[in-house]
Amino acid sequence: MWRHIASNAITMMIVVVFLLGGVILFGQSQYTAEGPLGAPICLRVEPGSNMSRVSKDLESQGAISSGTLFRLGAEYSDKSSSLKAGSFLVPAGASMEDITEIVTRGGANTCGTEIVYRVGVTRQSVQVRELDPATGRFVEVAVFDPSKGETPDVYAQTKAQSDTRYRIAMAEGVTSWQVMDALNNVDVLSGEIERPEEGALAPDSYEVRAGDTRASVIARMEEAQRVLLAAAWESRADDVPLLSPQDMLILASIIEKETGVPEERGQVASVFANRLKRGMRLQTDPTVIYGITQGEGVLGRGLRQSELRRETPWNTYVISGLPPTPIANPGRASLEAAASPDTTEYVFFVADGTGGHAFATTLAEHNQNVAQWRKIEAERANQ
């Protein structure tokens, strides 16, 4: 009898073990299987949250089939205690295992709201935007000019969110004074800065954190430009008429300010390179403008004949060769164009009415192009 009872007990234990194993295997398969989410979502994990709250949020958004299984899986993989606060993009069909990895691996937020401080050539602006998970693109929520004292409520509300990201977007061709002025208007940064050397900052998009110092942002911009400058100088053409990386930086800044069409950079660079080789003055308006404004904002009007004749260290109608400093902060493409200009015989160019330029090798050709441009200007004035 006891032998029969013992035998039945052993059999029952074996059945329970097999059933338990089956449950575990089923749970594992569900945890790693493709999830029910039909479209991407942005999951916000608040500071101090836990896997229980996250699982309820995921369930309510239809991202997981079982909050209990999600929590058990995270606990079993020893990741429950690694939950990170922030906003995370959860792709369509993400498994519970995938989502656990997303909310515990750390790093920068992958979705949510972002404030972008834009430093442009003609103006600065602040843009509040939010990532649309469905398209993967940012949607503008608000935009304003900080120099005019405009501050919409949504800006303050967005700054108050713990997972808001911040970015400084510096356009190609802005001056160092414009960058300094813009950074002084970024109220999430701290500390004071002096005006950086002209041309020393790399135009790019820089992610920052609230509380970062303005000096640290400038240091990152300067280091990025040093890297770009060194790379362009190393790859320069053998016959480029430049004596130093600084000469290349100066020429690149002029190319940047003269180029309305990016594809023309190499041709514009060739004009200046050819002029330098022949001992011709560069005769470029942006250098004259810099001599007037010193890079502090935009001129906002056309140049006068008296200004074209006025002698300043930057007036390339008066001085020979390059001006003493850059006239703006050039980007990578202009640095590369200065280092390796197109091979042409061009020594003249003038606006062609399309935003680009008409290039010429002789003065006669150039005069024809100038006459055509003046005709276009006259027609526009009469419209």
Image (cartoon, rainbow, N blue to C red):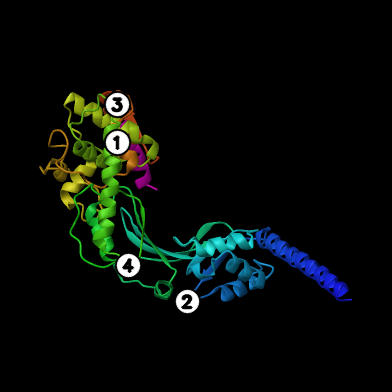
For the question of whether residue 172 can be seen, the reply is yes
* Residue for badge 1: 232
> Which numbered mark, 4 or 2, is in the foreground of this view?
2
Q: Mark 2 points at which residue?
A: 48
Q: How far apart are marks 2 and 3 (CA)?
A: 65 Å
> Distance between the Cα atoms at labels 1 and 3?
23 Å
SS category of the residue bearing label 2 = loop
Q: Name the secondary structure under disc 3.
A: loop
> Can you tell which mark lies on residue 346?
3
* Residue located at (16% from left, 40% from top): 323
Quarter residue 184 falls in: bottom left
- Give the distance between the C-alpha atoms of the residues marked 1 and 4, in whole angstroms: 35 Å
Q: Where is residue 69 in the image (x, y as percent from the top left)?
A: 66, 69
Drawn side of residue 292 relative to residue 257, left or right: left
Q: Residue at x 53, y 65 (%)?
A: 103
Say which element carries label 1.
helix
Q: Nearer the viewer, residue 354 or 118?
A: 118
For marks 1 and 4, the one nearer the N-term is: 4
* In this view, the mark in front (2 or 3): 2
Residue at horizontal 26 percent and vertical 47 percent from the top: 329
The region drawn magenta spans: 366-383
